[in-house]
Image (cartoon, helix red, strand yellow):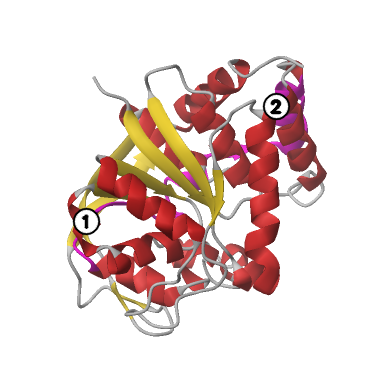
Amino acid sequence: MDQTRVVLDCDTANEVDDQFAIAHALGLPEGTLDVRGVISVHNTTAHGPGSRDMYQEEAVRVVALCASDVPCVPGADRPMESMEEPVPSAGLDFLVEEARLSPLTVIATGPATDVASLLLAAPESRENVRVVWLGGFGDEASYKVWQNRMGELNGRADISAWRTLLKEPVDLLHIPTWPAPAKILVDPTSFGEELRALGRPIASYLAGILQPLAAEYEYRSGKELWDLACVAAVADPGSITSEPLAVPTLDAAGAHDFTQPGREVDVVLDLDERRVLAGLMEALARHPEG
């Protein structure tokens, strides 16, 4: 079978899970994914107007630690101003070109600005593109109160893009942050030691950004690595469970309305978290030793 051509579209350094997702994708066995590039998208809700550049620096760092030569391309530096206006960027140009070459899967683990801009700027790409996007809630009281203190960041950071992605006729695998990705929980201290034991520079770096979170998550069940669900869904489809569901409509403030459902898309409802984490560790072990 041909490799799946993918572009990773990430808000790397908004959290720590994008870094894990990039390293996972780049460490998969040869012939699994053809990673064409890593695009950095803003999250101005989390880190203000300079967020895209901050995330770009982190993406370059992570890719270098993986000893990979895939290009890191700056994407949108701000949200869409409306559902009709794409945000221009080098990342958008890169996506348009890659989508024209052959079928492409965009693994989007941040705000949907770049993928929504692609659908608007190059509508013909809808025939050639699959989008795997993590965002929104599933719901469990809007994914519990503490996570919802600012709303779900990937969606809230660009509500126009979020609404566009749910509306436009593109092949979409939607991964709400709850219930499936919320199961990918690790203890920052002990899992960090497992990472360091691999003896890989990228694994040690991931431990270094994860372990400082130990105090924050001391009284919780663990730290979520949500974005790993997106890579697993593409590289190891048997690790996730999905089914077609009607997406909600969203108002201009991003409020869900399930009483007037929109089109049907595939939605991830469950996953095997042990299998996902085992796949991550196997991928990290394939990276060069220090």
- Compared with 203, 120 (above or below) is below
Helix or strand or loop: what does disc 1 sit on? helix
Which residue: 58% across, 16% down?
A: 286
Task: Provide residue 281's location: percent of width, then percent of height.
Answer: 58, 22
| Residue 188 part of the magenta-drawn span | yes
Which residue: 44% across, 66% down?
A: 113
Which residue: 58% across, 32% down?
A: 23
Q: Quadrant of the N terminus?
A: top left
Mark-to-mark CA distance, 1 and 2 = 36 Å
Q: Nearer the viewer, residue 52 or 195?
A: 52
Q: Quadrant of residue 164?
A: bottom left
Residue 131 in sight in this render: yes
Residue under label 1, please give it. Answer: 126
| Horizontal relation, residue 142 to residue 209: left or right | left
| Horizontal relation, residue 20 to residue 245: left or right | right
Among the two numbered marks 1 and 2 on one chain, the one whose residue lies closer to the N terminus: 1
Q: Quadrant of the C terminus?
A: top right
Q: Amino acid at mark 2?
A: Ala
Helix or strand or loop: what does disc 2 sit on? helix
Residue 203, disc:
2
The range drawn in magenta is 168-196
Which residue: 43% across, 61% down?
A: 114
Task: Provide residue 21's location: percent of width, then percent of height.
Answer: 54, 38
